[in-house]
């Protein structure tokens, strides 16, 4: 379960404030897969990063029950001088799981070939995303934060990702960001629309998609 209480977040550039979260209070129920929608730049990824603890809110508080993933699709937490293998072993130690089992799973799933044993500084963005997705699927989180994984790799790998997510999310909670409305319809139960720093909750994913499309004028 994730609860946001009066959460605000602002960024400043050249003395100008941009508020991406404006006094948001929201409770995401346990056992639900929730789609998070909003126009480009609305603050969806920022909201996920705050829930994951990667960013601090400017005001308010966020409480989480259970083990929450990093934003799947976000690979900013890896060490560029370490190999994919070394990063995987490090993550295993952080989460207290068997490192050999996680390495075997990630190496097969990520399909990085020899690059798995090379430093991440030489990885493309897509290769980093593959590693991050494989790592997240190798750990049984209680809540998954998912950020645009439908953009990972080629069509075959994206289909593989979606199938794995659909299976994993049958038994877990999740907050999912994606520009693919078809993907959200397939995997989500409910939806949240973020617009102007405020959110609206919808019990049905179809209602949330309709609201999002109306905001975009499509």
Image (spheres, grey):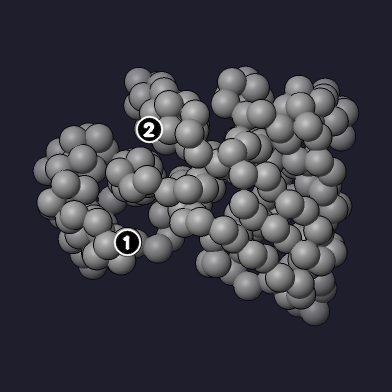
Q: Position of residue 167 (x, y in %)?
A: 43, 26
Q: Is residue 16 left or right of residue 99?
A: right
Cα–Cα span, label 2 and label 1: 26 Å
Q: Is residue 151 above or below residue 90?
A: above
Report whether residue 18 is seen.
no
Measuring 62% from the left and 37% from the top, which residue is drawn there? 32
Q: Position of residue 71 (x, y in %)?
A: 50, 51
How many numbered discs? Answer: 2
Q: Position of residue 93 (x, y in %)?
A: 24, 65
Measuring 71% from the left and 32% from the top, which residue is drawn there? 190
Q: Is residue 175 above or below residue 95?
A: above
Q: Which residue is mark 2?
A: 153
Q: Quadrant of residue 77?
A: bottom left
Q: Which residue is mark 1?
A: 95
Q: Position of residue 207 (x, y in %)?
A: 81, 26
In the rendered view of the protein, which quadrant contains the C terminus?
Answer: top right
Labelled pair 2, 1 in contact (Cβ < 8 Å): no
Measuring 13% from the left and 51% from the top, which residue is drawn there? 100
> Secondary structure beneath disc 2?
loop
Q: Residues within 10 Å of mark 1 (few under 14, many from 20)?
A: few
Q: Nearer the viewer, mark 2 or mark 1?
A: 1
Q: Nearer the viewer, residue 94 or 20?
A: 94
């Amino acid at each position: 379960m994730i609860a946001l209480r009066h959460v605000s977040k602002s960024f400043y550039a050249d003395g100008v404030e941009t508020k991406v979260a404006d006094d948001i209070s929201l409770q995401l129920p346990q056992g639900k897969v929730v789609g998070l929608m909003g126009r480009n730049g609305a603050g969806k990824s920022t909201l996920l990063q705050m829930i994951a603890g990667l960013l601090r809110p400017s005001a308010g508080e966020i409480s989480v029950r259970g083990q929450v993933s990093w934003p799947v699709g976000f690979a900013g937490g890896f060490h560029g001088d370490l190999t994919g293998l070394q990063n995987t072993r490090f993550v295993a130690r952080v989460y207290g799981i068997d490192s050999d089992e996680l390495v075997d799973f990630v190496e097969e799933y990520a399909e990085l070939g020899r690059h798995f044993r090379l430093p991440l500084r030489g990885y493309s963005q897509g290769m980093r995303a593959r590693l991050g997705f494989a790592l997240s699927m190798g750990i049984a989180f209680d809540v998954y934060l998912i950020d645009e994984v439908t953009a990972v790799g080629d069509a075959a790998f994206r289909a593989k990702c979606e199938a794995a997510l659909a299976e994993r999310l049958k038994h877990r909670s999740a907050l999912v960001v994606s520009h693919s409305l078809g993907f959200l319809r397939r995997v989500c139960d409910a939806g949240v629309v973020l617009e102007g720093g405020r959110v609206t909750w919808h019990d049905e994913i179809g209602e949330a998609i309709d609201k999002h499309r109306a905001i975009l004028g499509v």
